[in-house]
């Protein structure tokens, strides 16, 4: 018996240390809790392996031992007992692992739950990415080889539209499947812009996508870069693991680092099915670290980090300087697109290398597009034109799911949220919520209502397979309130057909939808009167000011 106990003390403790060391090798500075779980998991499995190894080793020691063991000094016996208790201690953790909510149980939760065939859900969103930058959507400059390769294995939605032209309200609609007015993310008419910056947050009375997936048994993780997606705005709701940049006056986490953060989460999180959301910010920032020096040197002293450079200075420069600045903006934006494409491709490659590809629903999209002077202005949040509301949408289905290669009809980005819920086996809520994405071409497209401009004139829009209508409800000139574009003949929206009386029925429908939305906003404001609380932190305020969102 002494031989077995001696072997157990040695092998169990060595296994414990070796397993903990192996788990520590997987640690990530971005996910401290998951890193601790990896150490715990390694230590428990190492101890178990050592305890099992003690059986043959103890038998071998017992065979070699003499028949009459010599008595040991008291101190050695005490030390032996203490060592045995230490070696036995991890057994208590294994007992605790039987409790579903215990830390050891969470650390050991690996692999796919029995009989759970639901796919992993992976959302890769790229801030301010125009659809027409991708080769898959017709660009011939070769900017996005990784995304184009992904498109060849995915379903491409040629006409995907967002509910709002900027991040908070657009992604809020994706996560609630509701337009901003119906999910509490639209400000009162004529309110000042800081309402969005200081008070706007995900509504507590509306369940969001991550909460519903978490409640259905999905492990949930988010790796994000955007000040409007911070925890204080409720974006961490439903996420087991949540990371968003918190340091410095600006959004400084580039695509390379964000890719590693997402890869670390997948390596440290062994539970399936899971929902992972990675949101890249770089195409918003116009300052890729890989921009060639000779490109940057052509424009000394010009800064791209604030829209005020255009609004306050360049918009009023002479035509030659203005045109040069516009070329600079397009060039810097293009460099960002190429940079993000490379690192998004690395994330996709890691999904293939890890064996997760076939059993995952993987989506690449954007929260909104970007205006690059297409209609005389710059950036996003102020316009309802196609370059801002139309986004790329590529969906790689799990193995066994059939879908057409391209879907030409009109769809909304919030339908993606409904699709995730459907694949998780969850019903869509009743009411105004978007329906899941179609997987067959040739069907009648959706009618997509968009609203909630961030700054500038209040605007709403209605998009169908044939028409786009833009409405300015508070414009002083009745003849300037509507713009109408024929999507078949004028996809770039250059000829306004409203003066000719085109699509009068859609104009009237958009007017009614806009009034109904306004009533929703006013009603919610009355219900919440006196309960509104500031959510903006000083750190977030500095970031918003550096990005031009606040004075």
Image (tube, rainbow, N blue to C red):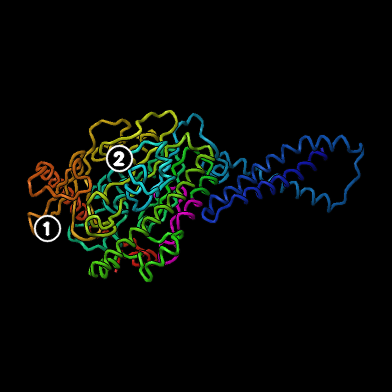
Question: Residue at left 26%, top 30%?
Answer: 442
Residue linked to disc 1: 475
Residue 65 vs residue 477, the one in the foreground: 477
43 with respect to 131 (left or right): right
Q: Crowding at label 2, few (<14), some or many (≥20) Cα neighbours within 10 Å?
A: many
Percent position (x, y) of residue 528?
A: 24, 55
Whether residue 550 is visible here, answered yes or no, is yes
Mark 1 residue element = loop
For residue 395, above or below residue 452: above
**Magenta segment: does it hold 119?**
no
Tag 2 near tag 1, CB within 8 Å: no
Percent position (x, y) of residue 433?
A: 26, 40
Question: Residue at left 90%, top 46%?
Answer: 71
Point out the frontmost of discs 2 and 1.
2
State the quadrant of the C terminus. Answer: bottom left
Whether residue 183 is visible here, answered yes or no, is no
What is the spatial separation of the Cα atoms under label 2 and label 1, in whole angstroms?
A: 32 Å
**Magenta segment: does it hold 238?**
yes
For residue 341, above or below residue 417: below
Q: Which mark is residue 158?
A: 2
Residue 124 vs residue 86, the one in the foreground: 124
Mark 2 residue element = strand
The disc, 2 or 1, on the residue closer to the chain's N-terminal end is 2
Percent position (x, y) of residue 471?
A: 15, 51
Q: Where are the magenta residues, as a range?
A: 237-261
Question: Residue at left 10%, top 48%?
Answer: 498
State the quadrant of the N terminus. Answer: top right
Percent position (x, y) of residue 434?
A: 27, 39
297 with respect to 372 (left or right): right
């Amino acid at each position: 018996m002494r031989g077995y106990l001696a072997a157990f003390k040695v092998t169990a403790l060595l296994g414990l240390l070796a397993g903990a060391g192996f788990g520590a090798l997987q640690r990530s500075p971005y996910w401290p809790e998951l890193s601790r779980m990896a150490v715990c998991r390694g230590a428990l499995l190492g101890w178990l392996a050592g305890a099992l190894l003690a059986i043959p080793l103890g038998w071998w020691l017992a065979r070699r031992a003499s028949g009459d063991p010599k008595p040991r000094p008291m101190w050695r016996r005490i030390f032996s007992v203490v060592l045995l208790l230490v070696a036995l201690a991890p057994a208590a953790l294994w007992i605790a692992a039987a409790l579903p909510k215990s830390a050891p149980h969470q650390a050991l939760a690996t692999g796919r739950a029995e009989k759970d065939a639901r796919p992993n859900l992976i959302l890769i969103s790229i801030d301010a990415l125009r659809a027409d930058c991708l080769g898959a959507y017709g660009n011939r400059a070769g900017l996005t080889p990784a995304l184009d390769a992904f498109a060849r294995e995915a379903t491409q939605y040629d006409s995907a539209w967002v509910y709002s032209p900027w991040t908070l309200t657009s992604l809020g609609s994706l996560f609630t499947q509701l337009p901003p007015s119906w999910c509490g993310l639209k400000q009162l008419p004529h309110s000042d812009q800081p309402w969005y910056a200081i008070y706007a947050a995900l509504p507590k009375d509306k369940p969001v996508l991550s909460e519903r997936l978490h409640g259905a048994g999905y492990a949930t993780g988010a790796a994000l870069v955007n000040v409007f997606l911070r925890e204080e705005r409720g974006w961490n709701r439903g996420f087991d693991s949540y990371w968003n940049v918190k340091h410095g006056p600006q959004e400084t986490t580039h695509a390379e680092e964000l890719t590693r953060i997402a890869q670390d989460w997948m390596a440290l999180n062994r539970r399936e099915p899971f929902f992972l959301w990675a949101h890249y910010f770089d195409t918003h920032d116009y300052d890729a670290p890989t921009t060639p020096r000779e490109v940057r040197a052509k424009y000394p002293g010009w800064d791209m980090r604030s829209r005020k450079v255009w609004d306050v200075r360049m918009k009023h420069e002479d035509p030659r300087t203005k045109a040069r600045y516009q070329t600079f903006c397009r060039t810097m934006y293009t460099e960002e697109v190429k940079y993000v494409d490379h690192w998004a491709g690395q994330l996709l490659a890691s999904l293939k290398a890890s064996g997760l590809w076939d059993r995952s629903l993987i989506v690449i999209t954007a929260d909104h597009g970007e205006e690059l002077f297409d209609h005389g202005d710059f950036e996003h949040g102020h316009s309802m034109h196609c370059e801002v509301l139309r986004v790329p949408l590529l969906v790689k289905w799990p193995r066994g799911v059939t879908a057409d290669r391209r879907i030409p009809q009109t769809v909304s980005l919030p339908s993606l949220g409904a699709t995730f819920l459907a694949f998780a086996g969850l019903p869509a809520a009743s009411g105004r919520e978007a329906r899941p994405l179609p997987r067959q071409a040739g069907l009648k497209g959706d009618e997509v209502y968009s609203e909630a401009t961030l700054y500038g004139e209040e605007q709403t829009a209605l998009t169908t397979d044939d028409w786009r209508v833009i409405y300015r409800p508070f414009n002083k000139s009745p003849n300037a309130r509507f713009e109408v574009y024929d999507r078949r003949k004028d996809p770039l929206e250059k000829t306004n057909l409203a003066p000719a009386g085109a699509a009068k029925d859609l104009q009237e429908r958009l007017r009614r939808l806009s009034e109904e939305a306004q009533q929703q906003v006013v009603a919610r404001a009355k219900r919440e009167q006196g309960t509104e609380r500031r959510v903006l932190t000083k750190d977030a305020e500095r970031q918003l000011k550096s990005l031009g969102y606040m004075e």
